[in-house]
Image (spheres, helix red, strand yellow):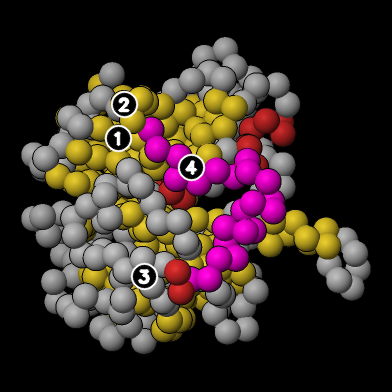
């Protein structure tokens, strides 16, 4: 299915990566993507059985929502994203395993980890999370914790290491998470990634000098100085100049917008500044009374192209909901207005895109989406994909 051209975007074409009316497939940004070249792509996402009968079936609650019965799936394409092969699916993480089994896995001695060469093009990092309920020693009530761990693969995600490393929160923080936007590789081979931590909500930089064997908390990238919200959905891009850029969403704080901070040394960061302008989008004239409500911006995924331009793909959950993008042609100094990739969703439960530049220069993005198909709650949640080119 094609779509009319919008703004700086042209040659749009949509596909389905994983669609089954008896499953909920969601949140690929949490799980990741890898382009191995020569047409081989991998997209990772959560997949769970779903009856679409009650609100709990489609809930995002960590306690009893869809992810509590989900597995993290790696699905592969060998033809530049045109077709996706379910027979080659790999289960990277299984959240349905008993708590005791998951705890045993996380509790292994990291000294038993293999030394892997993560500089090879076949290498993949997977930052996972799992929800554990344990009794609070003082109150006896169940207390939820969500440890974050890392496992690695050196063979394109066909197999994964059997001993993980857990990532502790920054000093003074009680929680941490990381979606699977690619790490940035520095000149000496060290890798860095942006993590979200709390409380209060903030974004931090972590680094590893040994291919992810151990990790150091390096600096705080951003916090909402208004004290009303939090930055989240953090991702890094490394410019040829050596400057790091961290793209994120400031959520309900001093401003609610996609924004960016920069650093030349990994330790000091500029104040987050918005990269979007309110009142300059392609949506306002198409509002309809009674349409679903949602947020204007969600889950940005930045991508620096081979020609030096930067594209940020993001989700919109306010009607008309869908997937859109921004473009910078000067390393993030200035930004285009948003261009629509698609906006035909039946509801606002969508987004968390991942994206890559294909061998022929087109961009492929995958995300979760919903279209009316007879299932309740505005239709089946599936993994969709879109190809597009820039003008």
Q: Earlier in the sequence, mark 2 or mark 3?
A: 2
Q: Position of residue 211 (x, y in %)?
A: 31, 70
Q: Which residue corresponds to mark 3?
A: 212
Residue under label 2, please give it: 85
Q: CA distance from mark 2 to mark 3?
A: 30 Å
* Residue 91 sits inside the magenta stretch: yes
Residue 344: image quadrant is: top left
294 is higher (above) or lower (below) than 101: above
Q: Nearer the viewer, residue 95 or 234?
A: 95
Which of the marked residues, 2 or 4, is nearer the chain's N terminus? 4
Viewer-side residue, 229 vs 301 = 301
Q: Quadrant of the N terminus?
A: top left
Label 4 and label 3: CA atoms lie apart by: 20 Å
Marks 3 and 1 sit apart, C-alpha to C-alpha, by 24 Å
Residue for badge 1 = 76
Q: Residue at x 32, y 43 (%)?
A: 158
Contact between marks 4 and 3 (CB within 8 A): the answer is no
**Magenta stretch containing residue 351, yes or no?**
no
The answer to whether mark 2 and mark 1 are in CB contact below 8 A is: yes
Seen in the image, is 84 located left or right of residue 348? left
- Range of magenta residues: 89-110
Query: Which class describes the residues within 10 Å of circle 3: few (<14), some (14-19), or many (20+)?
Result: many
Task: Out of 182 and 93, give the one closest to the viewer.
Answer: 93
């Amino acid at each position: 299915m094609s779509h009319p051209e919008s703004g700086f975007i042209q040659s749009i074409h949509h596909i389905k990566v994983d669609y089954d009316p008896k499953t909920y497939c969601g949140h690929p940004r949490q799980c990741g993507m890898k382009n191995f070249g020569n047409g081989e792509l991998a997209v990772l996402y959560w997949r769970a059985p779903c009856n679409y009968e009650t609100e709990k079936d489609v809930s995002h609650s960590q306690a009893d929502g869809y992810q509590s019965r989900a597995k993290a799936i790696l699905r592969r394409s060998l033809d530049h994203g045109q077709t996706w092969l379910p027979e080659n699916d790999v289960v990277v993480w299984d959240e349905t395993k008993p708590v005791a089994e998951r705890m045993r896995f996380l509790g292994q001695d990291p000294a038993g980890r293999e030394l892997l060469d993560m500089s090879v093009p076949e290498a993949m990092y997977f930052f996972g999370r799992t929800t554990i309920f344990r009794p609070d020693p003082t109150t006896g009530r169940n207390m939820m914790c969500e440890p974050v761990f890392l496992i690695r693969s050196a063979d394109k995600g066909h197999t994964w290491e059997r001993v993980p490393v857990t990532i502790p929160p920054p000093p003074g923080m009680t929680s941490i998470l990381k979606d699977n936007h690619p790490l940035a590789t520095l000149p000496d081979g060290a890798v860095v990634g942006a993590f979200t931590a709390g409380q209060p909500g903030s974004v931090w930089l972590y680094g590893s000098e040994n291919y992810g064997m151990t990790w150091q908390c390096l600096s705080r990238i951003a916090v909402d100085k208004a004290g009303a919200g939090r930055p989240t959905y953090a991702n890094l891009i490394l410019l040829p100049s050596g400057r790091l850029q961290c793209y994120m969403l400031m959520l309900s704080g001093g401003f609610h917008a996609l924004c960016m901070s920069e650093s030349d040394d990994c330790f000091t960061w500029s104040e987050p500044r918005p990269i979007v302008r309110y009142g300059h989008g392609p949506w306002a004239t198409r509002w309809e009374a009674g349409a679903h409500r949602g947020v204007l911006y969600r889950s940005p995924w930045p991508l620096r192209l081979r020609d030096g331009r930067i594209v940020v793909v993001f989700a919109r959950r306010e009607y008309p909901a869908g997937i859109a993008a921004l473009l910078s042609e000067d390393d993030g100094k200035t930004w285009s207005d948003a261009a629509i990739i698609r906006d035909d969703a039946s509801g606002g439960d969508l987004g968390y895109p991942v994206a890559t530049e294909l061998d022929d220069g087109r961009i492929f993005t995958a995300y979760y989406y919903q279209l009316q198909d007879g299932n309740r709650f505005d239709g089946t949640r599936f993994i969709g994909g879109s190809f597009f080119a820039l003008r």
